[in-house]
Amino acid sequence: MTYETAKSRFTEWNVDTEAALRRLAEIPISMHCWQGDDVVGFEQKSGSSGGGIQATGNHPGRARTPDELRADLEFAYSMIPGKHRLNLHAMYMDTDESPDRDAIEYHHFAAWVDWAKSQELGLDFNPTFFAHAKADDNLTLAHPDAGIRDFWIEHGRRTREIAAAIGAELGSPAINNIWVPDGMKDLPVDRLAPRARLEASLDDMLAERHDPAHMRDAVESKLFGIGVEAYTVGSHEFYLGYAIRKGVLLCLDMGHFHPTENIADKLSAVALSVDELLLHVSRPMRWDSDHVILLNDDILAMGQALVSEDLLKKTHIGLDFFDATISRTAAWVIGTRNMQKSLLRALLSPLDRLKEAETALDFTTRLVLTEELKDLPFGAVWEEFCKRHNRPTGTQLIGALDDYQRRVEVRG
Ligand code: RNT
Ligand code: ZN
């Protein structure tokens, strides 16, 4: 079907495809650097990520250096329509020095900022509270030892400073997301004391005020992790309360809840209490497995919530998945494009008509509409979007992904 035919089909529903395409082009997705190297990072160390998260698989082509990671990112962005962002973790420093986490400075990341400028990308940032000897107990900001807590508080302070400098340099606020792995494998006797310590550490870390035009803090909750099955200090309730009381962003990761919870439903519920949200769009399978996101019901519901509840203006969309069993660049491309497709579907919905039926309690019409809408030619509009942004679709996309994967497979 041609775009023109599709356009007229949508016009029959009073949906303006041109407006949808314009709007979609303005929605940045923050692509996570850690899909490119299985969450390993570039510090002078070896080993796996730890902290209760786990990339599985050994597909050839893992990026081993900042240059390789940037080359892979450039390729991935060249397959994704629109201008986006990169979400960088502190352990991805680009430097010959080996600063410990409590000694990192802006200059250790300056190469990333120069590159982001050259690529016209925004940057987001994260302190790294895992993959480090001082995090081996799976306790960092909530550790009973004040010395360990202070080390991590200093790490957090420095990442906030770095994020602020990055945001100032790029003229776009860097969202600095705080996730700590803190928890226990088996049942704690006292669940409150670690939470009180986490709260006090966060307060210390966040005490210095940075210009929100340069950086904004987010806090990410979690249900459990590998080795921390019994208790997570920073649970959803903990951070929901913290974010509301302290005025920081709340990050909702789609893999961090009980499997039958509807994460899209949470957006409107918390949006009334927090000014801004951060999403880690992910796909849990049986556990927080961080599979590449599909264009499935969960992602469609997320896109719909963002658009129909007008929450895009207060939500930063970030991705969080890591699959090492497939081409890592293909994973980025497929996942990011799926997020965009879910937004496009929502932008192409006759929202006024749907809401009108709902307000009138005419649930029959609402059901007829939602089900008939599923037959509309969304694919032709997506293809047009890619064409206008000079990005391939279908067999051309598959060919480009294969070619690039073959090029990186020679890496050791
Ligand atoms: C872990 C969290 C966290 C990490 C990244 C690497 O469960 O989801 O966001 O995945 O910070
Ligand atoms: Zn996450």
Image (cartoon, rainbow, N blue to C red):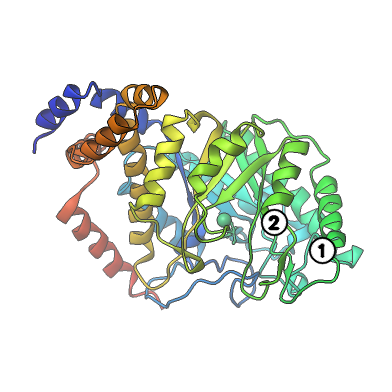
Label 2 vs 1, first from the N-terminus: 1
Work out which quarter of the rendered image holds the N terminus and state it. Answer: top left
Q: Residue at x 67, y 56 (%)?
A: 179
Q: State the residue position of label 2.
A: 235
Q: Nearer the viewer, residue 359 or 125?
A: 359
Number of residue marks: 2
Report the side of 252 relative to 319 (left or right). right
Estimate the x, y position of residue 213 in percent, counting from the top left. Answer: 64, 29
Q: Is residue 348 visible?
A: no
Secondary element at tag 2: loop
Estimate the x, y position of residue 315 in percent, counting from the top left. Answer: 54, 36
Residue furthest to the right in view is 146
Report the side of 206 relative to 254 (left or right). right
Q: Residue at x 68, y 31 (%)?
A: 212
| Quadrant of the image occupied by residue 217 | top right
Work out which quarter of the rendered image holds the C terminus and state it. Answer: bottom left
Q: Amino acid at mark 1?
A: Arg
Please determine whether, in this image, residue 47 is positioned above or below residue 100: below
Report the side of 95 relative to 38 (left or right). right
Please determine whether, in this image, residue 325 is positioned above or below residue 201: below
Q: Amino acid at mark 2?
A: Ser
| Quadrant of the image occupied by residue 234 | bottom right
State the mark number for residue 191.
1
Secondary element at tag 1: loop
Q: Is residue 383 visible?
A: yes
Q: Are marks 2 and 1 in contact (CB under 8 Å)?
A: no
For the residues marked 2 and 1, what is the alpha-carbon distance in whole angstroms? Answer: 11 Å
Q: Taking the image as four quarters, which one is ligand 2 found in?
A: bottom right
Q: Residue at x 14, y 32 (%)?
A: 6
Estimate the x, y position of residue 73 in percent, counting from the top left. Answer: 41, 54
Local packing at callout 2 (Cα closer than 10 Å; few below 14, some 14-19, many 20+) is some
